[in-house]
Image (cartoon, rainbow, N blue to C red):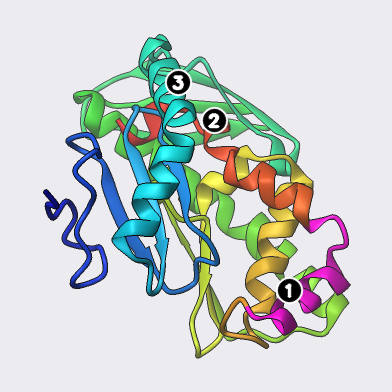
Amino acid sequence: MMRQVDQQAKAGFEAPSEALEGWRFRSSPRARRLSARVHLDGRVEIVLPRGTTAAAVEAFIARHRRWIDSRVAERRALDPAPFPPSRIDLPAFGQHWRLHLAGGSGAPRVTALGTGLLSLRGAGDRGAMVGALREWLRAHCREPMGARLGELAQQHGFAYSAVHLRCQRTRWGSCSRRGVISLNVCAAFQPAPVLDYLLLHELAHTRHMNHSVEYWQTVESVCPGWRTLDRELTGGWRHVPSWLFS
């Protein structure tokens, strides 16, 4: 028996019966192949290229089920990251921040006291504190990510119209037909070469709004080691602190 699992999946697609309850099936017109993602909290997401059949998904799950199950078990066995964190490391920028809990009243807010030192002031529950840290991260990443994107665009002759920063669970970046590039601030937790690959990946979409042979030739021309970096980026969620989405 087949059953629908995710409203965001491509219309008409129904998940195979062997899928676990809670698995998410997401159709992506930009995906080149079927892929499985196991998130920090143990959630499983199957990404489907356009036109994927139920039979192809069943075969994919059968091939990778042991790996998926083992990753889910690993994720669920991990102790949750302590919160509030004592430090926040941003390898993409070579930065390391210590977090000081200043207490006080009012809504939680995060300010930089100096190089490498943050202050979390105010009162509130965990969700409010996470929100304050997330807003600081988004604001803090805007300048270095935007500057690096501009440097790479100028270096390789790309043009884009604007850049937006978001904090997302599943997507590293995107590029619209108007040349608006959206980046996930979670990329700040990746090594600098991986961030550069992400930026070049999205810049290449300003010339090719697809994943055609020509697109990947463009990526190859500006980032010869992209295959290794792409694998690192795909697995890069392990570097993102679990509290960020708690």
Q: Amino acid at mark 1?
A: Trp
In magenta, the rendered stretch is 212-226
At x 23%, y 48%, the residue is: 16
Q: Residues within 10 Å of mark 2 (few under 14, many from 20)?
A: some
Q: Amino acid at mark 2?
A: Arg
> Is tag 1's residue or tag 3's residue first in the polypeptide sequence?
3
Judge depth for marks 2 and 3 and give the one in front: 3
Q: Do residues under tags 2 and 1 come within 8 Å of each other at their CB atoms?
A: no
At x 34%, y 38%, the residue is: 44
Q: From where the camera sits, is residue 182 visible? A: no
Query: Magenta stretch: residue 149 in it?
Result: no
Q: Nearer the viewer, residue 212 or 183?
A: 212
According to the image, label 2 marks what residue? 238
Q: CA distance from mark 2 to mark 3?
A: 15 Å
Q: Do residues under tags 2 and 3 come within 8 Å of each other at their CB atoms?
A: no
According to the image, label 1 marks what residue? 216
> Is tag 2's residue or tag 3's residue first in the polypeptide sequence?
3
Image-quadrant location for residue 79: top left
- Badge 1 marks a residue whose secondary structure is helix
Q: Residue 146, percent across and down?
A: 64, 65
Q: CA distance from mark 2 to mark 1?
A: 26 Å
Relative height, residue 125 to residue 29 (above, below): above
Q: Residue 38, percent across and down?
A: 42, 35
Q: Nearer the viewer, residue 86 or 215?
A: 215
According to the image, label 3 marks what residue? 70
Q: Amino acid at mark 3?
A: Ser
Q: Main secondary structure of the magenta part?
A: helix
> Is tag 2's residue or tag 1's residue first in the polypeptide sequence?
1
